Image: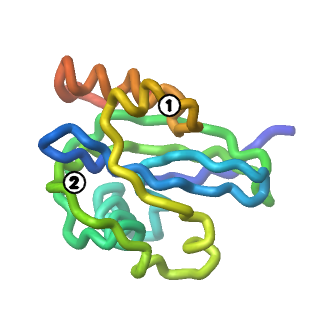
Amino acid sequence: MEITRVRSTARALLVTPEREILLVRYFAHAIGRAYWITPGGGIEAGESEREAAVREVAEETGLASATIGPAVWTRSVPIPWAEPPFVQRETYFWTPTPRFEPSAAAIPTEAERREIEAYRWWRLEEIEASSERFAPRKIGALLRTLFEQGLPSSPVVAE
C-alpha cells in the first residue's frame, strides 16, 4: 500500500544546562506500544514550524514561551496503523531550557491526554543504557553527536 498523505510536525529537544532532555512517554493505542518521544506535534494551518513548536511545548509540557533554537534534525516516518495511514515529517528544534516540572494540564483534548503516560528528564547515559523504545530510535547517538560536536549548520537526517 502506498501512503500519500503527509503530516508535518515540529518537535522540541528541551535540554537543560546539565544536558538532561525532557521526553514524554507516548502510548500509541492503535498498536499497543509506548515510546519515549520529544514534545511536539502537528503544524496547524497558517503556523510556521517554530510557532508550532512553541504551541506544542506549551500544550504538552506547560512551558510557555519556549525559546526555540535552530532545527537540528529531520525525520520522515510512515505511520501505517493510522486511519488513513500517513507519512509524518518531523523537524526537531534545539530548545535550551532550565529544568521545570512538566504538566499535561494544557493539552487540548482528552484523547491526547490519554496518549501521554509520563514525563521524564533523561541524561544521555540513561538513554544509551535503556531498553525502552525511543523515537527517533537512535536518539542517544544523535544527542551524543550534538553534545560532542555542537549544533549542525543545517538539520541532519535522524533515524
Using the image, determine if residue 152 lies above or below residue 14: above
* Residue 16: numbered disc: none
Q: Is residue 37 left or right of residue 133?
A: left
Residue tagged 2: 68
Q: What residue do we see at 31% from left, 36% from top?
A: 123
Using the image, determine if residue 121 lies above or below residue 103: above
- Local packing at callout 1 (Cα closer than 10 Å; few below 14, some 14-19, many 20+) is few
x and y percentages locating residue 149 in the rendered image: 19, 18
For residue 51, what is the image quadrant? bottom left
Residue tagged 1: 130
For residue 15, what is the image quadrant? top left
Under circle 2, the secondary element is loop
Residue type beneath disc 1: Ser
Q: Is residue 5 left or right of residue 152?
A: right
Along the line of sight, which residue is nearer the eye, 128 or 82? 128
- Residue most toward the right? 1
x and y percentages locating residue 159 in the rendered image: 51, 27
Q: What residue do we see at 37% from left, 43% from top?
A: 92
Q: How is the image coloured?
A: rainbow
Along the line of sight, which residue is nearer the eye, 152 or 98? 98
Under circle 1, the secondary element is loop
x and y percentages locating residue 21 in the rendered image: 31, 44
Q: Give the number of the mark in front: 1 or 2.
A: 1
Along the line of sight, which residue is nearer the eye, 99 or 113? 99
Q: Is residue 154 left or right of residue 107?
A: left
Residue type beneath disc 2: Ile
